Image (cartoon, coloured by chain):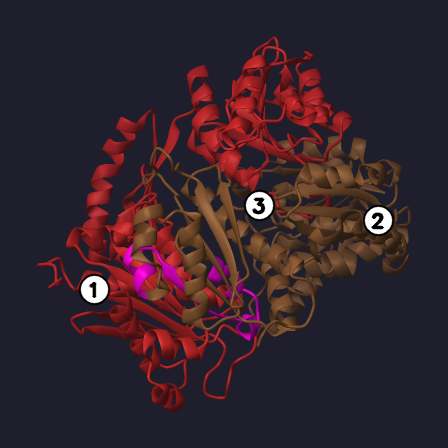
Chain colours: A red, B brown
Amino acid sequence: MVVEIVTIGTELLLGHLVDTNSAHVASVLADAGVDVYLKHSVGDNATRLESLLREALERADGVVTTGGLGPTVDDLTKDAVAASVGTTLEMHEPSLVAIAERFKSFGRTAPIAENNRRQAILPKGSIVLENPHGTAPGFVALRADGKFVACLPGVPREMKPMLAERLVPWLAQRGGLQDAIFTRTLHTVGIGESDVDNRIEALFRTLDNPKIAVLAHEFKVDVKIMAKARDGAAASALIAPVETELRARIGDGIFGIDAETLEGATLRRLAERGQTLGTAESITGGAIADALVRVPGASQSFRGAIVAYDNAVKTSLLDVDEGLLREHGAVSEEVALAMARGACARLGVDLAVASTGIAGPTGATDTKPVGLVYIAVVSRTGKASVRKLTLPGNRDDIRRRATVAALSLLWNYLDKEGSGAPPRT
Amino acid sequence: MVVEIVTIGTELLLGHLVDTNSAHVASVLADAGVDVYLKHSVGDNATRLESLLREALERADGVVTTGGLGPTVDDLTKDAVAASVGTTLEMHEPSLVAIAERFKSFGRTAPIAENNRRQAILPKGSIVLENPHGTAPGFVALRADGKFVACLPGVPREMKPMLAERLVPWLAQRGGLQDAIFTRTLHTVGIGESDVDNRIEALFRTLDNPKIAVLAHEFKVDVKIMAKARDGAAASALIAPVETELRARIGDGIFGIDAETLEGATLRRLAERGQTLGTAESITGGAIADALVRVPGASQSFRGAIVAYDNAVKTSLLDVDEGLLREHGAVSEEVALAMARGACARLGVDLAVASTGIAGPTGATDTKPVGLVYIAVVSRTGKASVRKLTLPGNRDDIRRRATVAALSLLWNYLDKEGSGAPPRT
């Protein structure tokens, strides 16, 4: 099946917005075995959209669009889509009910506003794609010969689940797809990219299906296994022996697969050991805690954080000695360790991780440049680990990298500690 | 002048790469007064590229492409471009000399490799766009009727200067450019989208240049003023009276313009008043503090945060009464207020914002559903404000919305407090 992608929005043509949607749609369609040969962006203009869609339907089996479904522009988008497949619009009653129910769930009792009613008007004979994350439903408009225009919302958090959970299954049951690409990703931390490369190079050269690829992120390296196969079972049979071989070669550094995150793996390991965790944050300003709390069930191990941005708070709430601050400065190994120890005591946790550093643009000195960061991990039993980093980039980059570095150090600390008896006393 | 943009590269169609080039080109062309009605991405495929270019030249005065000029694929790109304007390729001697000189400047003395020689082969009669940042020159291929295909490299650091310093001046001297588009965005908070719509609707209908557009985000609504004008001064003259009128109609809810963020505006206002701020976070888990610390110079007002994810930490570090937790539960108006008061005292700040809620997927009860969130703002002088929200979405959505809601409530609290004498005592 060949599909073209059309992203809709005048913002895209003015360059006010980078089109990330079409890359996401392209990637999901490729994984589903759909071929994409062309992508387009068009403004909120019915005439141009209609003729673009008509031309695309001559070349391809269908079109997937994103955007153009907001309350102010959806009329023109839906008019153009309906015209391109040779039909007109009508009210889709079940969608109207769904919209009413969504508003009721927010506690709104007023009648549905006209512009929200209009969201339920769709091309005749459309297949509706429900939108559990927003009011505007997506839909697939069908041309008499079976070619189609599938319209998804532009808001990524509404578009992505609708694509994965509604549109791809509909495309799959229509048939005509190529072998799909199935992937499994092994996530590692604490091993450099070139080290990973060296360990797997010999294997890499012998493989055709599945293929493997190495993708480096900050402090993390992924190894992706990609198999072309008819279905999931056939893909698993191809992937499993390669995964076993990779695990043998890479070893300890693997913290999880596929959707698993470093913070998720860390919390799972802590929960297995019955240990509790807290953070003491200066440069990261709560971002380490935020990453941990993002994981469902975080409360099983994560207790809390003290964000001591001001030195007075480092003293009053983390018991960092004023003399230590005077002697070594807030950005120092000594203060990072003292912060972590203070968090262990004040939060009553088994393990604490602390961050202190200079994010810039101001605050640097001759001996302490922007990007200097210390991360410490301390356990209640007194074991400690500290790491000095010099991180590149602007304020946002440095703070983001410091957060990932803290989670990495924490994971490596837990990994080295082994999985013996829980140290909780 | 109307131009279409074509980005070339198979990785764009596989979604392995987000197309940031076309947004940059679109934005620069808009600023130069060129109208862009369509953008396209195509793979490294000569047939599809040629037919895409032919169709684009029927609709527009010209096409600007990026990519497809690397050593492995440039033959097919240049073949397709030449064919689309009805010509063939030939060696462009001055470009060959330029390539040789560039290699010499790197200290290479060997003869130019065949694939680098090929970079100097261009469509007959092309205008060459020199590339001071790489070997492959760009070029403008001309059709007999004066329509053109301008080809830029795909590497952003080569493409951007070539676009700004070579192509835009060439377009300008050709003439036929429109006025450029200049924008100013007013950011509001605490007013619903439909309320903003109502306040500006009458104005909206009377305007042609500048135009205005309303863009809703969570808890925030932007009003964008877009003026077509010859230059910045002419644009300001068009925008200023509309901005004044919009400010009169929308009033207090406007917190900033253009690149200003809600957290930036909040910190600026606090700094003006000499007030300090802290947070007490449960459901947001440090995300409010993180958003504030992201602002350069946050330390002028922001002191720290206590993330009390566990109830024991709410008691021990925020002095929330255990009886209050038992009677009302952690997710309650009473506990939100007590957390904010505790943060004021423990962090020694003038103002504190607190969050408590149920992010899911577990933790809901009959009376407290997933998405129930309380936000409290309390000042050291005892003034307090609390808001109950029922937020839709999954765990990530709810936590993100709670963070924006907390910043919004804080801003509205500061806004209502007026700009009188600083309450610090």
Q: Amino acid at mark 1?
A: Asp
Q: Amino acid at mark 3?
A: Val
Q: Is residue A86 magenta?
A: no
Closer-to-camera residue (B136/A333)? A333
Residue position for label 3: B73
| Residue stretch in magenta | B288-316
Q: Position of residue B343 (x, y in %)?
A: 43, 65
From this view, report whether residue A181 is shown above or below residue B422. above
**Disc 2 is attached to a residue of which chain?**
B
Residue under the image location 69 percent in, 12 percent down: A88
Instruction: Answer left or right for B332 relative to B247.
Output: left
User: In this rendering, does residue A308 appear at all?
Assistant: no
Query: What distance separates the C-alpha of mark 2 from that of mark 1?
Result: 59 Å
Q: Amino acid at mark 2?
A: Ala
**Disc 1 is attached to a residue of which chain?**
A
Residue position for label 2: B227
Q: Position of residue B71 (x, y in %)?
A: 57, 52
| Dot 3 or dot 2, earlier in sequence | 3
Q: Is residue B302 magenta?
A: yes
Query: What distance separates the C-alpha of mark 3 from that of mark 2?
Result: 41 Å
